[in-house]
Amino acid sequence: TPGIRPLIAGNWKMHGTLRDAAALAEAVRAGAPAGVDLLICPPFVHLHVVAAAMLGQPVAVGGQDCHAAAKGAHTGDVAAVMLRDVGATHVILGHSERRADHGETDAGVRAKAEAAIGAGLTPIICVGETLAQREAGEAEAVVAAQVKGSLPEGFLAAGGVVAYEPVWAIGTGRTPTEADIAAIHAVLRGLTSPATRLLYGGSVKPANAKAILGLPHVDGALVGGASLVAADFLAIAGAA
Ligand code: PEP
């Protein structure tokens, strides 16, 4: 979208050792192309070390989730302020794996996004239909309902990002048609603002990045599997 700098975000999910994370981060830093914003989201336990290594570097670091509360008796959870404290600037929220594995709802995602904004983090809210929903012709309606339910007040003004990730395209090697991606992104644009960054995610790789990133209202990508290989992640960034 004219006037929006592309964002290429890597979601490392639950992969690698601390040593792997440090090496991957360094390779991304060393190869970061100009003209595009890069973000890497390591597992929580690797975040501090990666963020410290990226201090003053042109690669941002984010979490993969946060709790809606600022602190308290929430065993195993991490607060948005804690992410900010160790150097994160972004947080992925409502990823379909969290919605599926941890029963996250739109209302829950909205509460987390409020906490993230309050802590000074940029939330990246994920939405996307299942294969059954797409085949039933419900993709646009499902995504629109998720956006309406998951984005808190103040989200757009805070520079919040929306990622369209069809559940059936994540980690499968399958992607929607370019027309289908463009149609959903047009819906997302209508529900957000002219300045909102809209990412596509789901089996983005070097071979399809240029075509996907060239679609109207696609302002970047959220990359899973291919973000674990520095050369692939950088090739996707280079296509933006
Ligand atoms: C994701 O889970 O955010 C994702 C896009 O995964 P992949 O690129 O592996 O499909």
Image (tube, grey):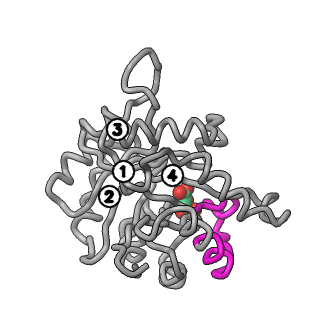
- The magenta stretch spans which residues? 164-185
Which amino acid type corresponds to the residue marked 3 in the rendered image? Gly
Residue on which the image places disc 3: 118
Where in the figure is residue 157, as x and y percent of width and height? Answer: 38, 55
Say the numbered circle drawn on residue 235. Answer: none
As helix, strand or loop, the secondary structure at mark 4 comes to strand
- The tag on residue 122 is 1
Query: Closer to us: mark 4 or mark 3?
Result: 3
Residue at image position (46%, 42%) is 113
Check the picture and name the quadrant holding the C terminus: bottom left
Q: Residues within 10 Å of mark 4 (few under 14, many from 20)?
A: many
Q: Residue furthest left?
A: 56
Disc 4 vs disc 3: Cβ atoms closer than 8 Å? Answer: no
Question: Residue 24 bears which disc, if any?
Answer: 2
Q: Residue furthest right?
A: 136
Q: Is residue 34 magenta?
A: no
> Which element type, helix, strand or loop, lies under badge 2?
helix
Q: CA distance from mark 2 to mark 1?
A: 23 Å
CB of mark 4 within 8 Å of CB of mark 2? Answer: no
Q: Secondary structure at mark 1?
A: strand
* Sequence-wise first label, 2 or 1: 2
Q: Which residue is mark 4?
A: 125
Mark 2 or 1: the one toward you:
1
- List x then y, in percent, for residue 156: 43, 56
Q: Residues within 10 Å of mark 3 (few under 14, many from 20)?
A: some
Question: How far, Cα to Cα, is label 3 from label 2?
Answer: 30 Å
